[in-house]
Amino acid sequence: MNLARVIHLDESDMNVYFNPARTGEWALSGGFEFSNWSDADLTGKARQAFANGWLGMETFGRATLVAVTPIEAAELDALEATLAKHFVEIYGAPSMEAAKAVAREELSHMADLCEDHDPNTVLTVQRELTDAGVREQFRSIKSEAADLEVFAVHSTPDE
């Protein structure tokens, strides 16, 4: 099974989000955070989080890019518990059991998004507020196999 981890190609996320996610943390779409938002909420850094931010599962911060990555069952179970606790503490879910069911759905949605992509495929999200609620669109950028020679400079002590 695949999920996605936060990646950063530069430092821009540190400037555009109130709470930037850390590189390497597991991520979800996190669109649920915006379910009760209106146009009045879409200003400044909050607007950027809404428009293009994935939700990191450790910091609950936002990131612009994620990469598809295989996940182990034990990691998935830990993420479910973390997300359920977040739902109870932040959103007032009535119980951990109820929150776990919703967390499982969110993780399943993310796994479905990642299912047809190879590892290291980069994903982006774009959201808009419509009369029917939050609309999310996802795009993928396939990773191209790159020869290490392109990135590494090899030398010997004699050179």
Image: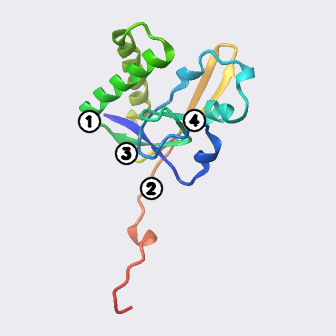
Sequence-earlier tag: 3 or 2? 3
Q: Decide: few, some or many residues near mark 3? Use Cα within 10 Å; few <14, some 14-19, many ≥20.
A: some
Query: What's the distance in space between the residues labelled 2 and 1, CA to CA?
Result: 25 Å
Quadrant of the frame with the C terminus:
bottom left
| Amino acid on which disc 4 is placed | Gly
Q: Residue furthest top?
A: 94
Query: What's the distance in space between the residues labelled 2 and 4, CA to CA?
Result: 24 Å
Quadrant of the frame with the N terminus:
top left
2 or 1: mark nearer the eye: 1
- Dot 4 falls on a residue whose secondary structure is loop
Q: Decide: few, some or many residues near mark 1? Use Cα within 10 Å; few <14, some 14-19, many ≥20.
A: few
Query: What's the distance in space between the residues labelled 3 and 1, CA to CA?
Result: 14 Å
Quarter occupied by residue 77: top left
Sequence-earlier tag: 4 or 1? 4
Q: Which residue is mark 3?
A: 119
Sequence-earlier tag: 2 or 4? 4
Q: Residue 144: which disc?
A: 2
Residue 21 x %, y %: 50, 40
Q: Which residue is mark 1?
A: 72
